[in-house]
Amino acid sequence: GIQVEQSPPDLILQEGANSTLRCNFSDSVNNLQWFHQNPWGQLINLFYIPSGTKQNGRLSATTVATERYSLLYISSSQTTDSGVYFCAVGVAGQNFVFGPGTRLSVLP
Amino acid sequence: GAVVSQHPSRVICKSGTSVKIECRSLDFQATTMFWYRQFPKKSLMLMATSNEGSKATYEQGVEKDKFLINHASLTLSTLTVTSAHPEDSSFYICSAKVGHYNSPLHFGNGTRLTVT
C-alpha cells in the first residue's frame, strides 16, 4: 500500500514565524488532504489538494503530484496554529492513508 | 457545507457494557462513512469502511464482532463497541465523503471513550 511520510515530526516556533511542512508519498494519488488536529482532538480540513496550489489566509499548500510530495506553508504563525498537522492521501476508490503527522507548538 | 456530527463527544462506561457512537452527515448524503481510531500521540488508524445498506468492510486486525458498524441510511452510521474493556479506551472519529472517488473527507469531532 501507499506509504506516507511527514517532516518534521515536531516543530517549535515563535509566534510570527513562518514554517513549511512536508508530506511525501510513495505512489501516485488522486486524493490528498491536509488537516489540522487541535488540542481538543477536532480535525479541521485545511486543503483538499491532489495537485496544484491553493491559499487560504495565512495558509497555503502546493502538491507536486508527479514528484509525490505536498507542502503546507504557515505564515505569521499564531498560538492557535498549535496542534498536529496530518496529510492524508488516497487512490481513487480506495481509502485515505494518513501520515504520522507534524506536531507544531507556537510559543507566545 | 459538508458537516458531520458525531455523538457523544465523551463517554465513560464500565467493563462489559456496550457503547454506541453515532455519526451523522447533516447537510449531505454520505454513501460511504469511515471509522478511525486514534491512540494518544499517534496518527489515525482506519478501522472500517461503512457503506449504506451493506455490511461494513473491516481492516485487518479489527474485530468485527467487537466493533459493530451499521449504516442504515445515507446520513447515519453507528459504531457499537460491545463488551467494552479498558484496552478499548481510545479516541474514535468518523468521517464521510461527498461522492465516491475523488472527493475530500469530512470529519466528526470524535468520541473519547474511557472504559473503567
Image (cartoon, coloured by chain):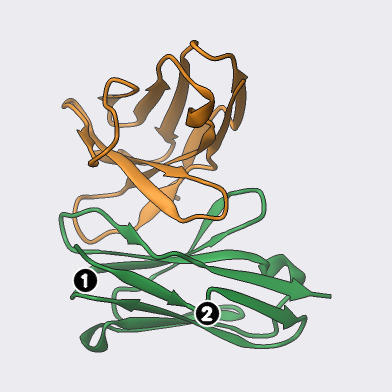
Chain colours: A green, B orange
Residue that extends furthest to the top in the rendered view of this protein: B17
**Residue at mark 1:** A29
Q: Residue at x 56, y 55 (%)?
A: B41
Q: Residue at x 29, y 35 (%)?
A: B62
Protein chain holding label 2 = A
**Residue at mark 2:** A8
Q: Is A56 drawn above or below residue B89 in the view shown?
A: below
Q: Is A61 drawn above or below residue A1 in the view shown?
A: below
Q: Is B70 drawn above or below residue A38 in the view shown?
A: above
Measured from the top left, where is residue B2 in percent x and y?
42, 48
- Tell me if residue A53 can be seen: no
Measured from the top left, where is residue A51 in percent x and y?
29, 80
Image quadrant where one finds the C terminus of chain B: top right
Amino acid type at circle 1 is Val
In the displayed structure, does residue B70 sit left or right of residue B81? left
Write down the quadrant of residue B109 in the picture. Answer: top right
Which mark is nearer the camera, 1 or 2? 2
Amino acid type at circle 2 is Pro
Q: Residue at x 71, y 87 (%)?
A: A17
